Amino acid sequence: MSVITVGTMAFDAIETPFGKANKIVGGSATYAAYAASYFVKPVQQISIIGYDFPEEELESLKARGVQLDGVEKVANKKSFFWKGLYHEDMNTRDTLVTDLNVLEDFDPRVPDSYQGAEFLMLGNLMPKLQISVIDQLKQKPKLIVLDTMNFWMETAMPDLEEALKRVDLLMVNDSEARELTHQYSLVKAAKKIREMGPKYLIIKKGENGALLFYEDKVFFAPAFPLEDVFDPTGAGDTFAGGFIGYLAKTGDISFNNMKKAIIVGSAMASFCVEKFGNTRLKELTAEELNSRIQLFRELTSFETELGIDL
Amino acid sequence: MSVITVGTMAFDAIETPFGKANKIVGGSATYAAYAASYFVKPVQQISIIGYDFPEEELESLKARGVQLDGVEKVANKKSFFWKGLYHEDMNTRDTLVTDLNVLEDFDPRVPDSYQGAEFLMLGNLMPKLQISVIDQLKQKPKLIVLDTMNFWMETAMPDLEEALKRVDLLMVNDSEARELTHQYSLVKAAKKIREMGPKYLIIKKGENGALLFYEDKVFFAPAFPLEDVFDPTGAGDTFAGGFIGYLAKTGDISFNNMKKAIIVGSAMASFCVEKFGNTRLKELTAEELNSRIQLFRELTSFETELGIDL
């Protein structure tokens, strides 16, 4: 099965308490595509880059089965650039620079060769653009996943509401779920969000794991307790890519299989943060991934029989 | 097997975004004893109360198998009183009033009838007093658990360090673990704390669950995603009481059994917060507890076979 990933391909400058990287390749669609490419081919990328985006990165993506027909290259503009400073907790960060550059002109086009894709991952973008991608698809995918952020809730809520009606799964972090619904309780927020459209909801809580809501059911995936987190950038997009990649590999969008997909996404994200940028995502082996997943299992497994008779 | 629980028996005044309670029975040892009493008898209480502590509460504890020989009653002073205001997130709170009252004179005495107890739960108190209880025991218990807080790290660190050398398990929240070790990474903090004495460490993360560290192993117990949290007061002490109560019931302090005990403690805590004060802890049935534990299991269980071959 094929996956379309939509989002940014960009440069990041990152400072964390453990080091800094001046200008490395980043962007939501880059991380998502690398992560998904471990599970499914082709990954069909839709994005926009400037003249300065490195050719070797494009080659590296192609070599992993990522199609770039939907990536527009603008000859006279630079790629999107973001500079951020992480605080000691690695969960909060300050944005120091946002240079939109090519992103100002982004009008995503779905190439003919992408038609018929079964899975669609809409990375965080202006909701109008996310809707435009859905509109261009001649056949509704089996699963549409949408990521968004508080900025769009504050500046483009009507469009976001429209987008939510047309997707199957929303992926947000806990503060975004609260902002979207004005509910502090995540259980209540989840109910409200599912009334807005998406049947499935994933609430990401960073180092505190992720929750999946569907009907009256809930599943919780822990984050892996790492000794060192070097760079959280891209962890959420890597999670998304691993999640949808695993679903596409198996072709099964049942709640039970989504649980597994969340564990796979969490495992991929736990690798992502071990080094700066997407370094770690280019070098993973099946052994590493399987043994990390085994650790995830052990992390929350306990024996069934508790024998409680009060 | 028997459990000694040491801590406060007090009055609380609580305000949350969902309501307020003017003066209700609280205290770390009260919550811990109620929770432990579901699993083990006798629970042997060590605490101090004033003339104003309600007789019916003492009767209610006794009826649940809690021995009160170690509870000193001061005829001319009031019980310890705490007043707090919870913020909307229910994880942070402001202390509005702390009236130590009888607590100023607390010098815990272990009655002869308590000698030989296999389990000791030292609730959060001045470390000197925690050490004094350990010193009075003629026979070292099978497991000594210590709870503490940042206040003692700032005002009585040498005593706390001495206490840590003499206990088997430390129970703190994430910010306390960080303050104690000057390490942000909880994995690193856990290593350092275990070098300070306790073989086992539980780091509580409130609505984000709890971690158990032992040797190079780690277990994670989620908190139950509740629709409404009415009053988080006592949740940590209830967790502690359920944890040590289950261990005492089973008499098994292996890592594997501690995992179960943490789930039991988390389940007890999830009931505690559903109503103000200790109301819920007086009325639980085995059915309720077992079915909540089943929900905990379902919350993190996923099928074993992922079939990942990259």
Image (tube, coloured by chain):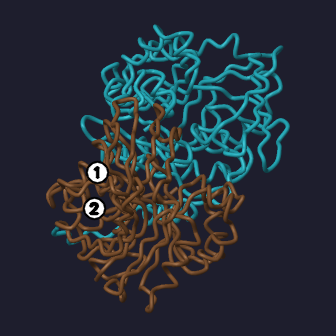
Chain colours: A cyan, B brown
Point out residue B133 in the picture as x, y percentages from the top left corner. Answer: 48, 78
Indicate the quadrant containing the N terminus of chain A: top left, top right, bottom left or bottom right.
Answer: top left
Q: Say how many tags the image has.
A: 2
The residue most toward the front is B76
Give the SS element for disc 2: helix
Point out residue B245 in the picture as x, y percentages from the top left corner. Answer: 31, 71
Q: Residues within 10 Å of mark 2 (few under 14, many from 20)?
A: many
Question: Residue under mark 2: which chain is it in?
Answer: B
| Left-right relation of B194 to B213 | right
Q: Label 2, on which residue?
A: B34
Q: Quadrant of residue A105?
A: top right
Give the residue displayed 46% in from the left and 7% down from the top: A158
Query: As shown in the figure, which amino acid type bears the numbered disc 2?
Result: Tyr
Asked if A208 appears above or below A148 in the picture, the reply is: below
**Which numbered marker is on residue B212?**
none
Query: As shown in the figure, which amino acid type bears the numbered disc 1?
Result: Asn
Question: Which callout, 1 or 2, points at the residue further toward the start of the chain?
Answer: 2
Q: Residue A240: in sight, yes or no?
A: no
Give the SS element for disc 1: loop
Question: Which of the pair B20/A263 is nearer the observer?
Answer: B20
Give the Cα separation between the discs numbered 1 and 2. Answer: 8 Å
Indicate the quadrant containing the C terminus of chain A: top left, top right, bottom left or bottom right.
Answer: bottom left
Give the residue displayed 42% in from the left and 60% down from the top: B8
Question: Which of the pair A169/B262 is nearer the observer?
Answer: B262
Point out residue A235 in the picture as x, y percentages from the top left corner. Answer: 60, 42
Asked if B39 appears above or below B138 in the picture, the reply is: above
Point out residue A200 in the picture as x, y percentages from the top left corner. Answer: 35, 32
Give the residue displayed 42% in from the left and 29% down from the top: A184
Decide: marks 1, 2 in contact (CB < 8 A)?
yes
Question: Which of the pair A128/B155 is nearer the observer?
Answer: B155
Q: Residues within 10 Å of mark 1 (few under 14, many from 20)?
A: many
Q: Label 1, on which residue?
A: B278
